Image: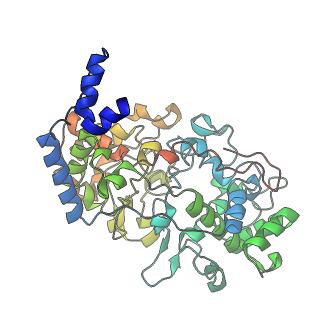
């Protein structure tokens, strides 16, 4: 009987029957609320601004052969690459800290502990903040001063000059990033250690002899049958004894490109038409980001510098420095690469992708939070002079240089008219948080279970 009523009378008949049986009639769902005209206008404005700036979702990294990834993963996490076998590349690029170490300035060779609690018995710090390793496939310049970079003519610039031979450069499958891993291993403070340390043949090689250091590293790796097998699987047809450290560095690049590309963010999903991905605060922040000169430097889809330019953004100087200025405790940034005094204290424009996860910020890790680095750009000259040094660890506070006037000599003038209030800061931070891929928050499975040397793994 019920089936016949539904067939004949549809919903109205069912409602009559339900009422007769003592049940409440079925009501149609309420209509959706009308769109908020303020939000609609904001969405339209942000979309227009993004279109005017040619912003698109960033692409993924593309496939990398698994054998190369497997080799690169082992190398990145193996302490065998350090002179005293006590530090790996991963020690300063920990998966548990979003491929950074959570410190303003890293503690390298000879340190103890991991992450923010890592210390050195002699109080030694690396001069610059350890940058994250996310989305390397989108970048062409590496290190804060860009000393490893792709050049317009297709060649690669590195600190080793002609010691990176044409045969080595031919191994690089991914551009300048393939050369990235060749240089932390040559730094005494970062990984190599000092002359005269027992069992440290890397430390005995003369400074500047890059070929000697790389050759000694390959001798070390070649002592492990497992490494020989990994290398020859990653480079079919080439015997391990015919390889150089360029093969190792290229493999580490392959691992980073394959496993650390995180580009699925609310912002990207908004760009392809999903209006609900961004909150009102994130929309307001996006509008501000695109209109108050942030994009004069962060102008690409990855929000770094399209033209490979470097900028002095009036950040204070602290830490041991790079041997520049009185006492050798200053850091002249890009000038150290190009020799051009006009580029003094200019540094690379970092990508904003996943920036929420990678504190502290600045070339020397001067800013503890995303709020503090964003706030720095509000009336920037005054912010520099009022810098709060208590946001860095106590061991670094006394190293802050009182050289603010010198910093402002080459400060980028496009920053001078930027002003915003606390609410504007919060909106900008909210927008930057929309550039986070949720998968980047927990990097489980990135580290190998073991490495061929059998040494401990920093994760």
Q: Is residue 147 left or right of residue 63?
A: left
Counting from the top left corner in percent of width and height, residue 272 is at 32, 58
The foreground one among 435 and 96 is: 435
The foreground one among 67 and 432 is: 67
Q: In the picture, which quadrant includes the C terminus?
A: top right
Q: Residue at x 46, y 43 (%)?
A: 357
Query: Coloring scheme of the render?
Result: rainbow
Q: Is residue 417 left or right of residue 282?
A: left
Count of numbered labels shown in the rendering: 0
Q: In the picture, which quadrant includes the N terminus?
A: top left
Q: As displayed, is residue 309 above or below residue 353?
A: below
Q: As displayed, is residue 240 above or below residue 24?
A: below
Counting from the top left corner in percent of width and height, residue 103 is at 53, 41
Q: Residue at x 72, y 70 (%)?
A: 214
Q: As displayed, is residue 15 above or below residue 401?
A: above
Q: As displayed, is residue 42 above or below residue 242?
A: above
Q: Is residue 141 left or right of residue 55?
A: right
Counting from the top left corner in percent of width and height, residue 382 is at 23, 41
Residue 416 seen in render:
no
The foreground one among 226 and 164 is: 226
Residue 69 seen in render:
yes
Counting from the top left corner in percent of width and height, residue 86 is at 74, 48
């Amino acid at each position: 009987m019920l089936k016949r009523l539904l067939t004949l009378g549809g919903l109205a008949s069912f409602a009559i029957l339900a009422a007769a049986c003592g049940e409440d009639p079925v009501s149609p769902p309420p209509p959706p609320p009308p769109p908020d005209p303020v939000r609609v206008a904001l969405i339209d404005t942000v979309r227009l601004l993004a279109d005017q700036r040619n912003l698109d979702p960033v692409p993924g990294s593309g496939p990398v052969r698994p054998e190369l990834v497997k080799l690169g993963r082992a190398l990145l996490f193996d302490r065998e690459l350090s002179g005293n076998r006590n530090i790996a590349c991963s020690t300063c690029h920990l998966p548990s800290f979003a491929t950074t170490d959570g410190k303003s300035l890293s503690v390298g060779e000879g340190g103890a502990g991991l992450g923010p609690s890592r210390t050195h018995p002699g109080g030694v710090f690396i001069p610059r903040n350890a940058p994250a390793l996310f989305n390397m496939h989108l970048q062409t310049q590496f290190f804060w001063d860009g000393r490893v970079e792709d050049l317009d003519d297709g060649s690669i610039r590195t600190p080793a000059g002609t010691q990176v031979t044409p045969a080595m450069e031919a191994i690089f499958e991914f551009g300048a990033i393939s050369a990235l891993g060749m240089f932390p291993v040559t730094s005494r403070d970062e990984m190599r250690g000092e002359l005269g340390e027992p069992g440290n043949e890397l430390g005995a090689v003369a400074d500047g002899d890059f070929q000697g250091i790389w050759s000694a590293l390959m001798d070390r790796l070649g002592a492990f049958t497992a490494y020989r097998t990994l290398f020859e699987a990653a480079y079919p047809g080439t015997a391990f004894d015919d390889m150089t450290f360029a093969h190792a560095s290229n493999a580490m690049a392959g691992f980073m490109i394959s496993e650390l590309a995180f580009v699925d963010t609310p912002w990207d999903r908004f760009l392809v038409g999903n209006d609900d991905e961004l909150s009102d605060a994130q929309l307001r922040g996006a509008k501000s980001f695109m209109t108050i000169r942030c994009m004069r430097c962060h102008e690409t889809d990855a929000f770094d510098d399209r033209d490979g330019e470097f900028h002095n953004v009036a950040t204070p100087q602290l830490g041991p420095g790079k041997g520049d200025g009185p006492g050798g405790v200053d850091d002249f940034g890009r000038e150290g690469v190009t020799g051009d005094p006009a580029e003094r204290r200019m540094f690379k424009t970092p990508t904003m992708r996943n920036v929420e996860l990678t504190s502290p910020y600045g070339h020397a890790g001067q800013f503890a939070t995303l709020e503090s680095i964003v706030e720095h750009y509000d009336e920037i000259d005054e912010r520099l002079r009022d810098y709060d040094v208590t946001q860095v660890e106590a061991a670094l506070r006394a190293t802050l240089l009182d050289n603010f006037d010198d910093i402002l000599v080459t400060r980028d003038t496009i920053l001078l008219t930027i002003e915003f209030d606390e609410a504007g800061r919060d909106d900008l931070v909210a927008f930057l948080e929309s550039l986070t891929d949720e998968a980047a928050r927990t990097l489980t499975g990135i580290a190998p279970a073991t490495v061929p040397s059998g040494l401990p793994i920093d994760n």
